[in-house]
Amino acid sequence: MTPLVNTAEQETRTAPSWLARLRDSDLWWSFKHHPSAVAAAILLLLLIGSAFFAPLITVQNPYDLASLDLLNAEIPPIWMEEGQWPFILGTDTQGRDLLSAILYGSRASIVIGAASVAVSLIVGSALGLVAGYYGKWADGLLMRAGDVLLSMPTMLIAILVSALARQALPPSLREVGASGVIVLAISLSAWVQYARTVRALTMVERNKEYVQAARLIRVPTWRILIKHILPNTTTPLLVTATLNFGLGILIEATLSFLGVGMPPEQPSLGTLIRIGNQFLFSGQWWIVLFPGLQLCLLVVSINVLGDWLRDALNPKLR
């Protein structure tokens, strides 16, 4: 006699994993057949990996002033006549190994860019859900506030907020809280784009049958917003967040270049470019060239992935 097999248990055993579903998805197929996206993803993984594993692969900690030696200042790259090992890309005016400074600076830029995207995404999504679902005065108030912020250049808002916050902090906390101030400065204007996207989609979804049914059975409003409406906004939010990741890194680099970003004791890529720019015409070209090249590669790889993701998730292009 053949034993009966529980159908639910059989389906559970044969259900594919999320990795198998990803391999069989249209998104993975599109990624494999997009050489630029594959190259950008590999490059981005190398840049992020080297930045976060910098303590294991660098010859010094550029943040540790005790490890710096002014006798090693302004050494050219190793392939030049006066180059010295282990300073592969040379040193800056303070004796910092430039490769070590670039990797540590990349980590600071990446963390600030990712944190600004996360803060903007959370705040913008929450405000967009409220504005789109409730409408009326909430919609008018939040969207008019967004219009005011959009009427001013993003860089101007970031510079103003960064400068004011630095003056408000005690001198002992200005260097420690520099990264948090930059994240706040970038997020203050970046949340509007997420809020507008979520608001438009929420206004469409709130009138659909599944939302009306949830209201009839008295599902809490917060649960309708988070469990039912928010998941339907993930595709455009994902594309926007990817593109804004590179933009956040650029804004941070610009703020640091202008002197209102990361301090010289905790250099980001923008700080390194600002320091190197002062010695560009003195012959120390490598101090500004290599940090600028690292910033360019980082932002270009993110933008290429963002462009691919936007096209891959667009149903009209399938």
Image: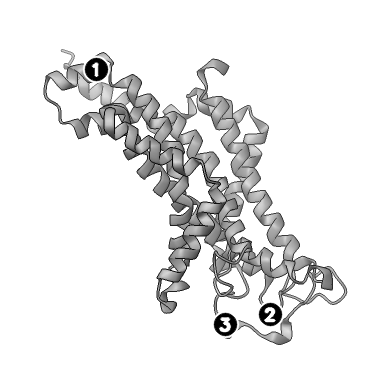
Three-letter amino acid code at the position of disc 2: Gly
Question: Considering only order in the chain, which callout, 2 or 1, is on the residue closer to the N terminus?
Answer: 2
Query: For residue 286, which quarter of the picture?
Result: bottom right
Q: In this view, does 285 lie to the left or right of 9?
A: right
Which residue reaches farthest right? 81
Residue 127 at what x, y percent from top left?
33, 38
Q: Which type of secondary structure does the marked residue at label 1 adopt? A: helix
Q: Residues within 10 Å of mark 2 (few under 14, many from 20)?
A: many
Residue situated in front as seen by the camera: 161 or 222: 161
Q: Which mark is residue 65?
A: 3
- Quadrant the C terminus occupies: top right
Residue at mark 2: 95
Query: From mark 3 to mark 2, how far is it between C-alphas?
Result: 10 Å
| Residue at horizontal 62 percent and vertical 47 percent from the top | 299
Is label 3 in contact with label 1 (beta carbons under 8 Å)? no
Residue at mark 1: 210
Three-letter amino acid code at the position of disc 3: Leu
Residue 6 at what x, y percent from top left?
18, 20
Looking at the image, residue 15 lies above or below residue 41: above
